[in-house]
Image (cartoon, rainbow, N blue to C red):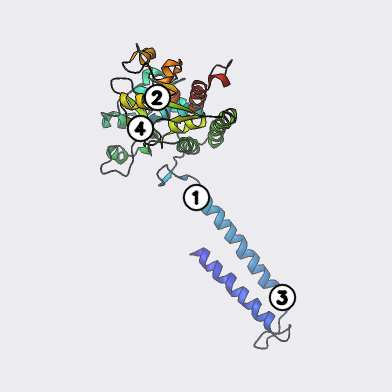
Amino acid sequence: MKFMKKIAVLTALFMTSMIFAACDNENYTSDGGEITTSLIRETEATIEETTELTETEAVTEETASSNEILDREGNLITIPDEINTVISAASSITEILFGLGVGDKIISADMYSADVEGIDPSICTLDFYNLNVEQLIAYNPDVIIINGISQTGTADPYSDIKAAGINVIYIPASESIEAIKLDIQFLADYMGVSEKGMELNAAINDAISDVSTRVSDIPEKKSVYMEIGAAPYLYSCGSGTYLDEIISIAGGVNIYASETGWLSNSEETVIAANPDVIITNVNYDGYDFNEIKLRAGWNNINAIVNGNVYQVGANETSRASQNIVKGIYQIAKAIHPELYPDEQV
């Protein structure tokens, strides 16, 4: 309201000056009053004072909202004055926080975060598929960061936790490289380390640029089958996923590019597609990726005939974090090993 009153004052002063200018005699107002030097100075002083007040108020308003930020769903949320304790509900979030240099603030995490570099595995015990609300409230963290679910669903499993006064941040599952970068920068801004977020995203951009340049002169792209779930429960990816983007950046063509999202596929469609390269990121204890070469009916696939079956890191290609930089190079080397003859990626 104060701001609007000041605008009104400025408008009135502006209109008065216009009346002055419109007079036939530049020394008199429209009703015959004489325009004195003191009147002009008084008017200028009023304008200057009002402008200063308006600018001060604007700064105050900006300061008041500096602790607010849009979350990854576009909702305005408030950043706590201090963030010293964090619970991470996903390994990708844990990786991002460590990448940002704030991983030491994690007091508890999901069980899949146990192999994240830098974390104490003993604190990675939470099962977010079977939520223990009382346990999470007992931790009393400054914030819990949730990945893969939305707060706009029909039921919020964290409503009781929020009712206890604990901040809960929701980050929807990120399907693209750009979305991963937005996750990184949002968490960086929220945790007060914005510049570090920019650094991590710059590294992703640099990797994309480097790999794109290396494959730019390749005359023909190779067809690629990306396996993220081993037989008998095959699983792969279509368009609209960051793995599909990486395959394209690395000079390949995903055999399932005509389909969308993460998908359950069949052996028959792989055989029919006859890919030039097969890449798997399946890497659990006791698994030997060479079993792909021995599958019935797969022996005539080009990738197997020519020995182009490769295993890449599971974490580097399955977690939506800054570590996809490693995944980009690993997939690029699998598709075009001749471009990386002496490089460990």
The mark lying in front, picked from 1 and 3, is 1
Left or right: 58 in relation to 86: right
Badge 1 vs badge 3, beta-carbon distance below 8 Å: no
Could you tell me how far apart the alpha carbons at marks 2 and 3 are, in whole angstroms? 90 Å
SS state under label 2: loop
Could you tell me how far apart the alpha carbons at marks 4 and 3 are, in whole angstroms? 76 Å
Amino acid marked by disc 3:
Ser
Instruction: Tell me which numbered mark, 2 or 3, is placed earlier along the sequence.
Output: 3
Q: Which residue is pictured at 60% across the width and 65% down the height? A: 50
Viewer-side residue, 184 vs 107: 184
Could you tell me how far apart the alpha carbons at marks 2 and 4 are, in whole angstroms? 20 Å
The mark lying in front, picked from 2 and 4, is 2
Rendered position, 4 above or below 269? below
Question: Badge 2 is on which residue?
Answer: 274
Instruction: Tell me which numbered mark, 1 or 3, is placed earlier along the sequence.
Output: 3
User: Alpha-carbon neighbours of circle 4 within 10 Å: few (<14), some, or many (≥20)?
Assistant: some
Mark number displayed over residue 262: 4
Rendered position, 34 above or below 112? below
